[in-house]
């Protein structure tokens, strides 16, 4: 049956649609144009660290300058090239089939920061934005990551208390001010995180303002620690 389906609907590259050998894969050209993060990275935000030694837990300049409320962080790829195209397809193009392979890439990056008993939760959308978009791409990613890591998933752990303006075009200070107090713990979900570590999932990390607001909410509600995981990371030289 599977062979018949592959004859009728041959696997296509997630990036460009050309034929590939297996489902949920990238062709050679798109793979080369997808900047997967590997090697030494900042232990707080996952950005690549040239010249650092892998596994030492080094911190980038931004994470030295900004007080991050979370303990550790990783990202699967840099937000450029085919990676940017895939993120935008998942976020705005109704391409929910990307969530499964994207979560597999995120899992490879996340293994050093996963701990037993973690609660996995997505960055939430405001309900007005969710109605317009019809789905939360971060919730689809968090579901797949939790399943792959065999961790508890709480898709509505966090709520957007108010609709924030777009972060696009804002400098770092304005991004953090825009997100101040915008994310809260769902009042009926506090028991899910009290005394437990939390893994927050988002599609893209830029300044970290949104993840910081979510991490503050989790820690304020009794989480023992917070780690963050993004599909893509915006880097200064990207």
Image (cartoon, helix red, strand yellow):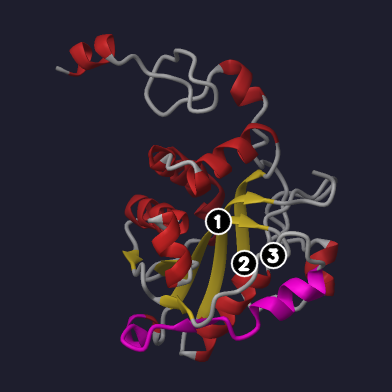
Q: In the image, is residue 35 part of the stretch drawn in magenta? A: no
Q: Position of residue 168 (x, y in %)?
A: 72, 59
Which callout, 2 or 3, points to the residue nearer the camera? 3
Q: Quadrant of the C terminus?
A: top right
Whole-Å distance between the Cαs marked 2 and 3?
23 Å
Distance between mark 2 and mark 1 Cα atoms: 9 Å
Does residue 216 show up? yes
Q: Given contact means CB atoms under 8 Å apart, are the residues at marks 3 and 1 in contact?
A: no
User: Which residue is painted at 60% across and 25% down in the image?
Assistant: 31
Q: Quadrant of residue 169?
A: bottom right
Q: In the figure, 13 relative to 114: above or below?
A: above
- Asked whether 176 falls inside the magenta stretch, the response is yes
Residue 74's disc number: none
Q: Which residue is mark 1?
A: 112
Identity of the residue drawn at 41% across and 70% down: 118
Mark in front: 3 vs 1: 3
Q: Residues within 10 Å of mark 1 (few under 14, many from 20)?
A: few
Left or right of 2 in this view: 97 = right
Left or right position of 198 against 209: left
Where disc 1 sits, the SS reads helix
Locate residue 223 relative to residue 5 in the image: left or right.
Answer: right
Which residue, given by chain and number where applicable, does mark 3 sit on?
A: 167
Along the viewing direction, whichever of 49 and 33 lies nearer the viewer: 33
Q: Residue lying farthest top?
A: 7
**Chain part drawn in magenta:** 172-192
Classify 10 Å Cα crowding around label 2: few (below 14), some (14-19), many (20 and above).
Answer: many
Work out whether mark 2 precedes mark 1 in sequence or the reverse, and give the earlier one: 2
Residue linked to disc 2: 72
Q: Is 107 placed above or below 124 here?
A: above
């Amino acid at each position: 049956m599977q062979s018949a389906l592959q004859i009728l609907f041959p696997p296509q590259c997630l990036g460009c649609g050309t034929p590939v050998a297996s489902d949920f894969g990238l062709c050679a050209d798109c793979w080369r144009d997808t900047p997967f993060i590997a090697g030494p990275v900042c232990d707080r935000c996952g950005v690549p660290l040239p010249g650092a030694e892998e596994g030492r837990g080094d911190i980038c300049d931004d994470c030295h300058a900004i007080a991050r409320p979370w303990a550790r962080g990783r990202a699967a790829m840099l937000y450029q090239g085919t990676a940017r195209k895939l993120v935008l397809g998942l976020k705005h193009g109704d391409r929910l089939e990307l969530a499964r392979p994207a979560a597999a890439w995120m899992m490879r990056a996340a293994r050093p920061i996963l701990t037993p008993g973690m609660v996995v939760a997505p960055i939430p959308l405001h309900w007005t934005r969710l109605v317009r978009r019809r789905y939360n791409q971060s919730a689809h990613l968090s579901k797949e990551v939790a399943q792959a890591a065999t961790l508890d998933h709480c898709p509505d752990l966090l709520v957007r208390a108010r609709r924030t303006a777009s972060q696009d075009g804002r400098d770092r200070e304005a991004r953090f001010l825009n997100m101040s107090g915008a994310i809260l713990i769902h009042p009926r979900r506090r028991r899910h995180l009290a005394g437990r570590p939390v893994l927050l999932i988002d599609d893209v990390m830029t300044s970290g303002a949104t993840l910081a607001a979510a991490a503050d909410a989790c820690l304020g509600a009794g989480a023992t620690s917070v780690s963050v995981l993004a599909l893509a990371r915006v880097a200064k030289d990207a």
